[in-house]
Amino acid sequence: MPKTGENIYKRKDGRWEGRYIRYYDENGVGKYGYVYAKTYREVKIKLAEKSAIISSRQILLSNSHVTYDEILTAWLQSSRINIKESTYARYTHIVDSHIRPSLGKYQLCKISTQLIEGYIESKLHNGRLDKNGPLSAKTVTDMLSIIKSSFEYARYNNLPVICNLSKLSIKRKDKEMRVLRQDEQNLLVRVLLDKIDLYKFGVLLSLYTGIRIGELCALRWGNLCLDDRILRVRETMQRIRDTNMETNTKTKIIITEPKSQCSIRDIPLPECIVVIARQFRASDKDFILTGDRVKFVEPRTMQNRFRHYVMECGIDQANFHSLRHTFATRCVELGFELKSLSEILGHSNVNITLNKYVHSSFELKHSNMNKLTLPL
């Protein structure tokens, strides 16, 4: 039973659960958040920390002369509850590296539409931190999205926002992705099969299933059901910025669920991959790329390995993600049903597959054009 005035309970699974009010909706109804721990004391400490954050936020948001720097801090704290750790790390990096230094000093009530437009324009032309030059349209789009969301957060809390960014957007050019021609793919496969090891097997697995590099690095042998010829994608690995101020590391490796619910999927394995996989089969809990339960290979290392294999082939430069595009293109050339291909790639709908990952080869265009004939 909870003590009087405390929302702390012991659950049936033995853990302690604490409940606190995150905010009140427009009808004055409290919306709750929850914390969990092994002991009553730990939960009480966590609840005290949450209360301190919420109280400081309420004091902040009652001040009409609040600076944008303070709004960004409050918005990040609020967003952290609903987003993945990797997303929070990316937001924090963009805010601290780009937005705070330029806009944080302004009072929120004095940030105009023209100021934001000029800021976005400057980032598109000369926004690089390491050297002179423009930021990518993707990065600036992410920055603009954060600015819009933080302003919306301020409006929701009845703070004065005078700028209107509804018409401001970034024009992005579609980047042409590298797809290996069939002859290039054949050269790569020969290099991979020559004295094949776990690294080469990983590249081959990606080429014949279309999995992402982070998904590959997180795979354990238990994800490969060789008897049923199924690859189960359940996790992804990535290196993110370490937002914990108590550590001395700038970045860290995390293994989490894939980028979306659709990315959690089962992929049928071709027999040729199953045959090779049986040569290296290890314990279910061992990482596929190392054959070890603890040691793993991170995506950056696999990128470097792949770059080495490409150089060994003597083909034009390509990055690891080109394997995914090559897989999708080969599948279309072989007549795969698009809905099935979309699910194998982990897309939410077929349009993403068609617009981003299907690249018609010139050979296929030739073949289709030759179907046009003159009447006899």
Image (cartoon, helix red, strand yellow):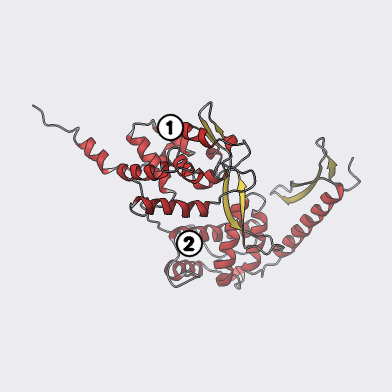
Toward which corner of the image does residue 17 lie, by quadrant?
Answer: top right
**Relative depth, front residue between 253 and 45:** 253
Q: Is residue 12 above or below residue 31?
A: above
The furthest residue to the left: 376
Residue 237 position, x and y percent, is 57, 48
Q: Is residue 171 visible?
A: yes
Residue 210 position, x and y percent, is 45, 40
Q: Is residue 355 visible?
A: no
Q: Name the quadrant of the C terminus.
A: top left
**Relative depth, front residue between 277 and 245:** 277
Q: Decide: few, some or many residues near mark 2? Use Cα within 10 Å; few <14, some 14-19, many ≥20.
A: many
Q: Residue at x 39, y 45 (%)?
A: 191
Q: Nearer the viewer, mark 2 or mark 1?
A: 1
Residue 115 position, x and y percent, is 50, 70
Residue under label 1: 272
Q: Decide: few, some or many residues near mark 1? Use Cα within 10 Å; few <14, some 14-19, many ≥20.
A: few
Residue under label 2: 140
Q: Amino acid at mark 1?
A: Cys
Q: Residue at x 44, y 36 (%)?
A: 342
Q: Secondary structure at mark 2?
A: helix
Q: Residue at x 50, y 29 (%)?
A: 229
Q: Secondary structure at mark 1?
A: helix
Relative to residue 275, is residue 30 drawn left or right?
A: right
Q: Amino acid at mark 2?
A: Val
Residue 19 position, x and y percent, is 79, 46
Decide: marks 2, 1 in contact (CB < 8 A)? no
Q: Name the quadrant of the N terminus.
A: top right
Relative to residue 34, is residue 95 drawn left or right?
A: left
Q: Label 2 to label 1, Cα distance in Å?
A: 43 Å
Q: Is residue 296 above or below residue 52?
A: above
User: Which badge, 2 or 1, is on the more N-terminal residue?
Assistant: 2
**Relative depth, front residue between 76 and 261:** 261
